[in-house]
Amino acid sequence: MSVEQRPEIEALMAESRTFPPDPAFSARANAQPPLYEEAERDFEAFWARLARERLSWSKPFETTLEWELPFAKWFVGGELNVSYNCIDRHVENGLGDKVAYHWIGEPGDTRTITYADLLAEVSRAANALRELGVEKGDRVAIYMPMIPELPIAMLACARLGAPHTVVFGGFSAEALSGRINDAEAKVVITADGGWRRGKPAELKPAVDEALRETPTIEKVLVVRRLGDRATQCPMQAGRDVWWDEIVPRQPPDCPPVPVESEHLLYLLYTSGTTAKPKGIVHTTAGYLLGTSFTHEMIFDVKPDDVYWCAADVGWVTGHSYIVYGPLANATTGVLYEGTPDTPDWSRWWQIVEDYKVTILYTAPTAIRAHMKQGPQYAEGHDLSSLRVLGSVGEPINPEAWLWYHEHVGGGTAPIVDTWWQTETGMIMITPLPGVTTTKPGSATFPFPGVDADVVDGEGNPVPLGGGGYLVLKRPWPAMLRGIYGDPERYRETYWSRFPGMYFAGDGAKRDGDGYLWLLGRVDDVMNVSGHRISTTEVESALVSHPAVAEAAVVGGSDAVTGQAIIAFVIVKVGIEPTKELGTELREHVATKISPIAKPKSIMLTPDLPKTRSGKIMRRLLRDIAEGRALGDTTTLADATVVETIRQNSGKSED
Ligand code: WT7
């Protein structure tokens, strides 16, 4: 593995403008500089203080951290309930009428859910789950559109101590069944469908298909979202139950089940470097502390803020910064079902204006998509309520940063570029608004208490100005506790590359001022529109098609999506390499994994460049995909292969 030199990063670091905090903002910022010092003095004592102050415990913890590398246990001996911390205590503190979520359906329907409403709904849903046989420790799969019942379902599971695994609604039936089987889930919570780009998008057929191969599933709870259209939604007697037939009749109270600090809160599957997604394990107390504290500090959340994280709840961003972190902080949030372009590109800005959104958290790919449409949509709306902007999911290029700053933030709102991962649970590298002077394109510094470093291939820290691999050197409360059912893979994936350190899989540089610049993945993982997709996963989907002999997938750069999936495919002898076959293969990947994993282009080629040992040379394929000059080809088994691919690629590109 080598850290690639990326010319765009060099250009990016040459961007010399810096953005110091506004003194007026600093004066009332939640985060203050001494936080760094306190955390550095004794990071365990720092997190222990916060855990005592911020979380409501039914039994106090005794030990802050048990660290048997790579296995961490935080706040050992303590007991608490996440749903209680996110809802009940706020209602008990007189915040029952405070809005938890302003929900906006894509067709324009809306719902306002207060903390008191949330308490009643979550309690009813928890009672309904119990009626369906769910008990503490049972896993529940959730496959839903962005409707209020999604966070309600998650919180209902947490109330019972039943771990959930949310599967993004854009995933295929096959992806869903794989996750259900790995988690051995007992119940699925889903909906007949949701609204997407002005049209109903059904979900239940995919569930029915997935459940043909999932022996552990006993019941399916189905929310009616599509209204009359749902009459066509087939329900299997004895297995499928409508949400509106079982939930509303339950009593609106359900005592939260106290669980141990390290009780499994959820599994979230993410792509690794193999074809099998990893079930990332997140537990209760440390996760809730890490997400809620970072949320309050990094977004400077105050009681009267209206906070909108525009991600889907199905990703970790949604888990940590739409559901658990914000609700633990009694925040008022916006939840929007649809896409930014429906009915047109002013939709988001209309929402910001209507709800006077003060904090917006989104991904660079979304900013670039807006940029592409031009600033007129944003300019046509009053965005003056916005006071903090966040970015996540991939490196943000300075051009997008500056556009966001100027056209969305009115040239004044600080931007927090937040680096983290499904595995880290919480934001790890980020500016603190009001404290940090930002540089467009840099995620700046580790969050207080986090020890991040950039090391060379031997694990030695690189000097200022150097590049290498991003590592984390001490445990943090929201860290993953493992890969579900596979401790060896956990150790191997994250803790074996550099002994004693967590290897994130990202390349990074530190500039002369010590600022961190994230350079993207250094493993076989692509980042498409902020979604993590494994090259191997797409390759194995391709080779599962009867016409395909061999496939290699690389990430090429794309102006909007960051990376785009480029596939090189060798067809079997006797198969015609036609354009139609290319289209069919793209659809095949969509069915196997998800439409988001569909290759942007497929090159049907007679051969692939390989080393003498038979390893596909991805670096060359990336060069070809991006039309770059070819690097050294001498390690190729057959140097003419590259030329052949290059010549054919123009013709067979889909
Ligand atoms: C990978 C993690 C964390 C929520 C969304 C993605 C990339 C994430 C940044 C950033 C540069 C970033 C990394 C990381 N990434 N945030 N601010 N700057 N790169 O979660 O699917 O687990 O992906 O996203 O490559 O490893 P994920």
Image (spheres, rainbow, N blue to C red):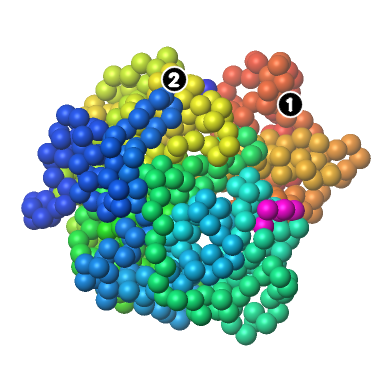
Which comes before the other along the chain, label 1 or label 2?
A: 2
Tell me where residue 479 appears, x and y as whole percent.
39, 38
Q: 3 above or below 80?
A: above
Q: Name the residue under label 2.
A: 498
Structural distance between the alpha carbons of marks 1 and 2: 36 Å
Q: In which quarter of the image is residue 366?
A: bottom left
> Residue at position x 71%, y 40% from top?
540
In the image, is the residue at mark 2 within 8 Å of ligand 1 by its beta carbon?
A: no
Amino acid type at image mark 1: Val
Q: Residue at x 37, y 70 (%)?
A: 119
Looking at the image, is mark 1 or mark 2 nearer the viewer? Answer: 2
Question: Residues in magenta?
Answer: 213-217
Q: Is residue 413 toward the left or the right of residue 588 in the image?
A: left
Q: Which residue lies furthest to the right in this view?
A: 574
Residue 72 at x, y = what percent? 39, 32
Q: Nearer the viewer, residue 517 or 87?
A: 87
Q: Is mark 1 on a helix, strand or loop?
A: helix
Label 2: element kind = loop
Instruction: Note whether 17 is above or below 323 in the view shown.
Output: above
Q: Residues within 10 Å of mark 2 (few under 14, many from 20)?
A: some
The residue type indicated by label 2 comes to: Phe
Q: Is residue 165 magenta?
A: no
6, 52: nearer the viewer: 52
Residue 641's disc is 1
Taking the image as shown, residue 332 lies to the left or right of residue 594, namely: left
Residue 475 percent location from the top left of the image: 35, 32
